[in-house]
Image: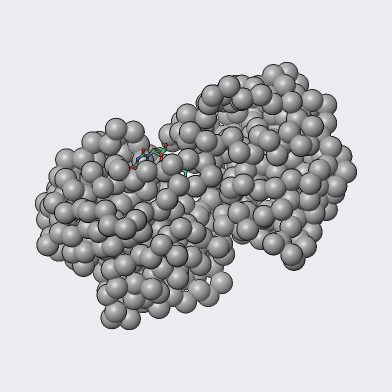
Amino acid sequence: MDKLIIKGGRQLKGSVRISGAKNAVLPIMAATILCPGDHRIDNVPSLRDVSTMGRLLEHIGYDVEADGSCAVIRSNGQNVTDAPYELVKTMRASVVVLGPLLARYGRARVSLPGGCAIGARPINMHLMALEKMGAKITLEEGYVVAEAKRLKGADIMFDIPTVTGTENVLMAASIADGVTRIENAAREPEVIDLADALVSMGAKIEGAGEGIITVEGVEGLKPLDYSVIPDRIEAGTFMAAVAMTKGDVILENCRVDHLDSIVDKLRSSGVEFSDEKEGLRVKMNRRPLSQNIRTMPYPGFPTDMQAQLMALMSIAEGTSVITESIFENRFMHVAEIKRFGADITIEGSTATIRGVRSLKGAPVMATDLRASASLVIGGLGAVGETTIDRIYHLDRGYESIETKLTALGADINRSKG
Ligand code: EPZ
């Protein structure tokens, strides 16, 4: 297994281009199932999860050609409506093929994603919504089997906002018969990006990004030609890395309007931001100030940035309290960050971080995607050498992170294991 080796203490300086958003490109790739023809998606990041989604589409009956940051997806006439466990178990986001398969072909058999390191990750709300739209859903040997002659528009109310649940319904409702109204819809920028992509295919969607979304089903859609938004979590991760190393970096191609809650917290901890013509400049020349953080659905502070901010707060002046309110087990990184010498205690869904002057490099192990990012941040700021094992987690969601960090002056190398 590949490892990362980091010699800490180097200030990050220069500029870095933010790649396309993983959590936008995955549902947008799934949306190509909704209609035949040749689809083109630009600003596609080169990530393990993107190639997994590509393999899943190929399994279903699409030829997927990646050419740099562009993906061309064309149907090859097979219409397999199965998403097998072998593929789904490596990427939970595969669940977003359920809605489009069912809407397009009237049938879908998708492996239940199973849990992951951060929680049980049920999909009951996805299934409730599709049943309301007329689907007959059974669970057979670990698979969701869904059937519907033609889905009907329905009024859907989610108990809590679900990102991929909202996305499944948006795609299914786009070619259902009648109007679908989603209440308590997820408002993440990635949901808006999917809605914009569907509208560019001819879907009729109002209200994406607000709590209530209305979709008027149409007979058919046209092939996609769309460019994906930049990845706000990659941008936030680099901001935390710059703050940890007292650096000065310009983030090119990032959507500042997607980053309000992250910028607010970092600014309160002493990070300086300024809009330059090349992009957003992020500067830090002091020890961060402690912060209290509660993760919330967008536009609140994102759970996908919780681990990264915890790494930064471990050297803050003062005591920080971080409450994880989205997932039930998203503190797997705490034990690893403590190996750097951080002083963190957990009480249920709340972590208390008493800032220490500095971290010391150590061998650590990644447990999930964003946890691995927090260990990179810790290693960049720690005195001495850090080795991070199981970095396949990192490769799922960060495009060439060590190349980008090296270009900013970090001493970071990948050892092929
Ligand atoms: C999406 O996951 C993201 N993944 C996650 O990013 C992100 O952490 C999460 O949204 C929250 O923002 C993608 O977009 C591919 P949810 P998703 O449904 O859709 C519960 C990353 O690091 N729930 O919004 O699976 C669920 O257990 C990943 O890039 C149900 O109970 O998350 C959680 O507690 C990690 N029943 C809460 O809702 C359901 O049917 C929010 O989950 C669905 C969800």
Q: Quadrant of the N terminus?
A: bottom right
Q: Is residue 244 left or right of residue 297?
A: right
Depth check, front residue: 5 or 44: 5
In which image quadrant can residue 370 be found?
top right
Q: Residue furthest front?
A: 141
Q: Residue furthest top?
A: 318
Q: Is residue 285 left or right of residue 32?
A: right
In which image quadrant can residue 148 be found?
bottom left
Residue displayed at 28% across by 68% down:
81
The percent coordinates of residue 183 (x first, y second) are: 25, 36
Quarter holding ligand 1:
top left
Residue displayed at 26% across by 63% down:
108
| Residue 210 visible in the shown view | no
Residue displayed at 45% across by 47% down:
115
Residue displayed at 18% across by 48% down:
131
| Residue 4 visible in the shown view | yes
Q: Is residue 8 left or right of residue 370?
A: right
Q: Quadrant of the C terminus?
A: bottom right
In which image quadrant can residue 99 be found?
bottom left
Q: Residue furthest right?
A: 384
Depth check, front residue: 358 or 11: 358
The percent coordinates of residue 234 (x first, y second) are: 59, 48
